[in-house]
Image (tube, helix red, strand yellow):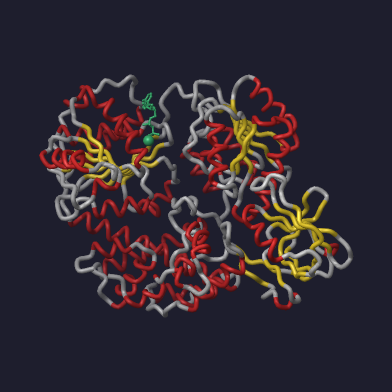
Amino acid sequence: MRPETLNPLFAETRDLDGVGPKLMKPLEKLGLTRVRDLAYHLPERFVTRRAIANLDEGGEGEQVIVALTPTEHRAARNPGRGPYRVLAQDDAGNICALTYFGRASYTAKKQLPVGEKRWVAGRLDRYGDMLQIVHPDHIEKESAAHMGRMVEPVYALSEGLTQPRIASLTAQALDRLPELAEWIESSQFEREGWPPWRDAMILAHKDTNERARDRLAYDELLANSLALLLVKAEGRRRKGQALAGDGRLRAKLDLPFEMTSAQKRSISEIEGDLQQEAPMLRLLQGDVGAGKTVVALAAMLIANEAGKQAALLAPTEILARQHFETLRKMAAPTGVEVAILTGRAKGKERESILMGLLDGSIDILVGTHSIFQDTVNYRDLGIVVIDEQHRFGVQQRLALAGKGKRAPHTLAMTATPIPRSLTLAQYGEMDVSRLDELPPGRQAIDTRVIAQERIEDMVAGVARHISAGQQAYWVCPMVRDSEIADIAAAEARYAALKERFGDDVVMVHGQLKPEVKDANMERFANGDAKLLVATTVIEVGVDVPSATLMVIEQAERFGLAQLHQLRGRVGRGSEKSVCVLLRGNALSETGRKRLALMRETQDGFRIAEEDLELRGGGELLGTRQSGDAAFNVANLEQVQKLLPAAHADARLLMERDGGLTSKRGEAARQLLYLFERDWGVQLLRGG
Ligand code: ADP
Ligand code: MG
C-alpha cells in the first residue's frame, strides 16, 4: 500500500483547476496524468527575454517581447497542410509573421484580432526574407510588465498546450507537494549541499539550478538501484530448477542456415546457466536482424528436452503472432507443441489452451502479457523469454512471473545496443550475451557524408533513383528543443521537393493529423509515392524493402543511436542501399567524428559505445516519449556522474536494512513509490 503522505502526488491532473477533457489530451500525450508527473515535468531550459521597442532591435533567434498590431490573417491554401500566418506590424512599420501549425491556428484567430495591438513574446526567426515568430509563447493585451518574469522556464509541449498553461499547471502541482522524510544517506546529502526534496522540486522549476536538478536525478537513480537490488534479493530467496537438456530436440531442427559464432556462443552461455539451480537472469542483446529468435528457440528447446515448458512474452499482439508463426515453422521438425495466447483468445479456444498448459501438452507458449495472468497455470514452466520489453518492465515481470513457485529461468531480449557501462543502470545485475555479429550475406549499407550545400546534387540523385524504379526516404531533423522551427523547415523542404517530384512525394511528421499521416504512410508503403519526407521516422513499423536510399539532412543534429536506427530502415531488400548524411558547415570536431563513425561501421554496439564517448552530457537515455527511456529525470551526464554513488548507497542500505523498516528505510519506500518502482516494495514480505 502506498504511504498516505504521497496521496496528493498521485491525485489526478484532471482534478486540477481549469483542466477539462480537451486539455487532458495533450497532457496525456506527455504522460502528465497525475500531480507527480507534472511536478517532475522539469523545464527543458530557461529563456531570458528582452523587451524591444521594435523588430529592428531584435536579433535572429532571440527571445523577445514586442508590441505588434495584426494586419492580416492568412490561412493555408490547403487546410491542415501548411501553416496559418498572421501578419503583424510593429510601431515602426516593420512586418513580422506570427506562424501557427495545426490546431494552434484557433489560438491565433482568437487572440490576434486585426488592428488591435498586442504584446507578443517568442523567438524571433527569419523565414525567407520575412521575420517570423512561430507559436508565440505569450500574447497579452496589456503592456510587457504583465508578461511574467524575464527568466522563464520552457517546458516540453504537445499540440494543444502552451507555455503559460503548462506553467500554471506545474505551479498548482508544486503547491501540493508534501514534505517528505529524507531518503538520501545523510553524509552524502550534506557533502553535496543538496536541498531537501520539496525545495529541490520548487527550485528546479524556477531557474537553472544544478544542485536541485542533481538531487532529483540522484533520487531517481537511487530508486532504480534499490528496486533492482530488491529484485535480486528476491531471486536469491527463490530456488529455480536445474535444466539439463540432452540435445535431442535441438538435433532435429532443420535450419536453412549455419548459426553464427555469436549465436552459438550465446546458446552455450544460456545452456550453462540453465544447468544451475539458481534462476537464470540473462539479457540477449543484438541489433535488428542479428538472429535472436533462433537463440530463443534453442533456449526453450533445452527446457523442453528437460521435460519443462517454455513461454515467450511479446510486447504486442502483432509481434506475438509473428513469433508464433516463425517458431511454429522452425520447431516443426522437433514435434514440440507451440501455442499462442493473447487477450483476443476467448471461450473454448482459450479454455483449450489453458488445459494444454495445465496438462503439459503445450511445450511452448507464445503470447502477450496475458500469459502471466493469475488464471494461466502451467504444469511446469522452466523458462520465460521476454522479447523487447521495456527495461523496467523486464524487472517487474521477472519479479512477478511464477511468484511463489520455483522461479523459472529468464532470458530477456533487446535490439537496443547499450554501452557496457550503462547496462547496469538499465538492466540491473543481469548477465549479458551479445549477438555482435550479423548473419552472413547481409548487404552493407553504403554510407556517405556530403556537405549540405550540395543539396541540389542530392535532389538530382534522388530523381535518378526514383526513375530507376526505387523509393527513398528524406529525413529532416526534429529536435524537441526547437520542434516548431524544425517542422517549419521540414515543411519548406517538402514544398521544394514537391515542386520537383509532384505527387511522387509525401510527408509525415508529428503535427499532421493521424489520418493524413496514415494515408501518406500507406501511399509510400504500397509504392504509390516514391519519396517520403519525414521528421524522424517515428513510425517504427515501416518496412519498405524497395526503399534503398535514405537522405538525412543536418545529420550532425541527430544522436548516433538515432542515426543507426534510421539507417536500419534501408538495406532490407536484396538491392544495394545507400545512406547519405548531409552535414552543415559549422561542424564541430566531435560532430565530424560522429559522422565518420557512421560511415565506418554498422555495428550498433560500437556506435553505442563511441556515441557515449563523443557526446556531451544533457541527453536522455533513449527517448522519453516512446516510454523507452530508462530515466525521466536523470540525463546521461547525471547518470554517469551520480550512478556509482547511488548504487553504492542503495547497496549499503540493503545490507543494513534489507526489509526497509528503519526510519530511513521507510523514507526509501516512499521513494520507490514516488518513482513507481513499487514492485520492488511489493517483493518485501509484508510490503
Ligand atoms: P532479430 O534479432 O531481429 O529478432 P531474427 O531472429 O528475426 O532477428 O532473424 C532475422 C533473419 O535472419 C531471419 O529471417 C532469420 O531466419 C535469419 N537468420 C537468423 N540467423 C541466421 C544465420 N545464422 N544465418 C542466416 N540467416 C539467419
Ligand atoms: Mg526479433
Image side of residue 13 versus residue 655, left or right: right
Residue at horizontal 73 percent and vertical 37 percent from the top: 496
Residue 683, position as x, y percentages in the image: 24, 62
Residue 580, position as x, y percentages in the image: 63, 32
One can see residue 413 in this view? yes
Residue at horizontal 68 percent and vertical 55 percent from the top: 100
Q: In which quarter of the image is residue 274?
A: top left
Residue at horizontal 79 percent and vertical 70 percent from the top: 117
- On screen, 138 above or below 663? above
Image side of residue 240 versus residue 500, left or right: left
Q: In the rendered image, which quarter contains the C terminus?
A: bottom left
Residue 501, position as x, y percentages in the image: 69, 30
- On screen, 437 above or below 372? above
Q: Quadrant of residue 646?
A: bottom left
Residue at horizontal 43 percent and vertical 60 percent from the top: 643
Which quarter holds ligand 2?
top left
One can see residue 641 in this view? no
In this orientation, which residue lies closer to the viewer: 145 or 548? 145
Q: In which quarter of the image is residue 120?
A: bottom right
